[in-house]
Image: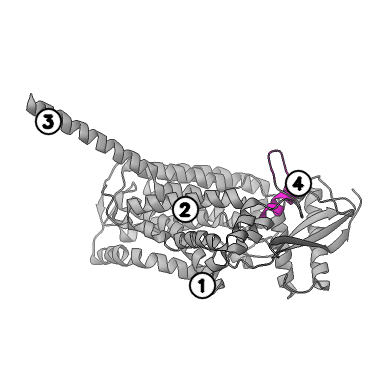
Amino acid sequence: MKSARPFHFQDHHFLELLLARLAFAVVVWISLPAEIAESLQSHPNGLAHWIDFRWIADPDILRSMRWGALLALGLYVLGSRPGMMLALPFLFFFSLADRTLANSHGNIHHGYQIVTMVLLAQTLVVLLSPLVARAWTWWADHRLGRQLMFYSAVVITGCYATSAVTKLDATDGKWAWQGPNIGIQLVKTDRQNYYNHLNREGENFAPAGGTIPAAANGLMEHPMLARAAMACGLLLELFAFLALAGRFPALLIGISLIAMHRGIEHWMGLTFEFNEYLVLIFLINLPYWFIRAKSAIESKSAKSLGSRSEQG
Amino acid sequence: MGQAETPVSGSRPRKAIAIFLLVGPILALPLFVTLTQSLEESYPFSHFPMYKDPSPTEFYLFVADETGEPLPIAHMAGVSAAKVKKRWKSRLTEVGADWKDEPSEAFEQTGRELLASLRELAAARKRPFPETVQLVRADISYLDDQFREDLYVVATEKGAAP
């Protein structure tokens, strides 16, 4: 497990792959609905232009789908190649149907795409794996594990890259320069959060004409600082793909992305929990660093034992 | 885990391996970005347009009763204020209007339709709306070193009394 190799050529420890699958399975399960309150498809999005997805809101069908998902997630975590070939397409389809319907009400939410797209990438990798494998294996071998990790990371970093490209395209490259205007957005988000519940216990948002969030004033009063901060965020999104260069870049960029999301949540009240989970699993990848630290400690102990016995 | 391997014969798979290993990783990211930029919003693909063009003016919407007292819309209808805004913008786009236009009949009509749909959702959650509800819009701007919020009623909707 050499950390200097590019991501695509990294070998992954069996335990690292198992924990990544387990953690991703938990994230997928959290992302799936327990109930669907709105079964409208009034503003079709994506495949909803051609397919009616309202059936998934039926409580009996949804319950069956959830049982199916539990079984599929179990198969996925176990990691047999045929099991994953069955499980991943089902999980992708469930996520796709649920969120396509949710995004067909006239308001598009951007919190779940990353999960469904990672499922799609993993589905394609697993289904195509017999074509590119040197040999058929019943269990996910190193090659398949490597490809699952790599293409998941491609999707995750690609989401950030495309977000940055969209911003640059919409503003003719001047997005960071317009950074102070994010102050206006902070006021909007604060008010919207207030009007959701008129402040539940512990919430401190303000209604129209109320207190202006300190960060909004700060951005307006210090425009150059605001531009510098926005430029940092934009560059991080644009160059997040450098995480694909190896373990250390993935760790550094992963930590930076999570710090960015924490900041956005703190100042804007906007959460992207699934982005954070996936960055943690596929870029930061804590099990790898634990395994590496353990090996380093063991090898140091072995060396010191060896040198003591030589001295003896 | 068992690694019982059954060799796959022939040169095609080996060629595919080479292409997959060498070209796949290099092309995967640009392909992904090109795909998402072309498809824009087509689930699961998205070009993630959130805050793509921070403009010096912005607005938000809230639902109020006839006296102007705001209603906790996420609690009552299960739809957040942010979603209320997105839904109104979608309806406006459908009738060929834009939120930056001067207030028009299109604003009022789409606003009334939106309030009626929210009323239905609130009733289904057994948290009914009062008889008369208003859709209020607040325009935010920053002038003379101060934030301004200008409020006006977009639409009023009358339903059955709870």
Q: Is there any visible trace of residue B97 in the rendered image?
A: yes
Marks 1/3: CA distance? 60 Å
**Looking at the image, do the residues carrying marks 3 and 4 touch, with CB atoms under 8 Å apart?**
no
| Mark toward the start of the polypeptide (1 vs 4) | 1
Crowding near the residue tagged with mark 1, few <14, some 14–19, many ≥20 C-alpha atoms within 10 Å:
some
> Circle 2 sits on which residue?
A257
Residue B78: numbered disc: none
Nearer to the camera, B8 or A3 = A3
Marks 3/2: CA distance? 43 Å
Residue A173: numbered disc: 1
The amino acid at mark 2 is: Leu
Q: Are marks 1 and 3 on the same chain?
A: yes
Q: Secondary structure at mark 2?
A: helix
Q: Position of residue B52 (x, y in %)?
A: 58, 66
Residue at 77% x, 52% y is B121
Q: Nearer the viewer, mark 1 or mark 4?
A: 1
Residue A307: numbered disc: 3
Q: How is the image coloured?
A: one colour
Crowding near the residue tagged with mark 3, few <14, some 14–19, many ≥20 C-alpha atoms within 10 Å:
few
Residue at 24% x, 33% y is A298
Q: Is there any visible trace of residue A84 in the rendered image?
A: no
Q: Is residue A202 magenta?
A: yes
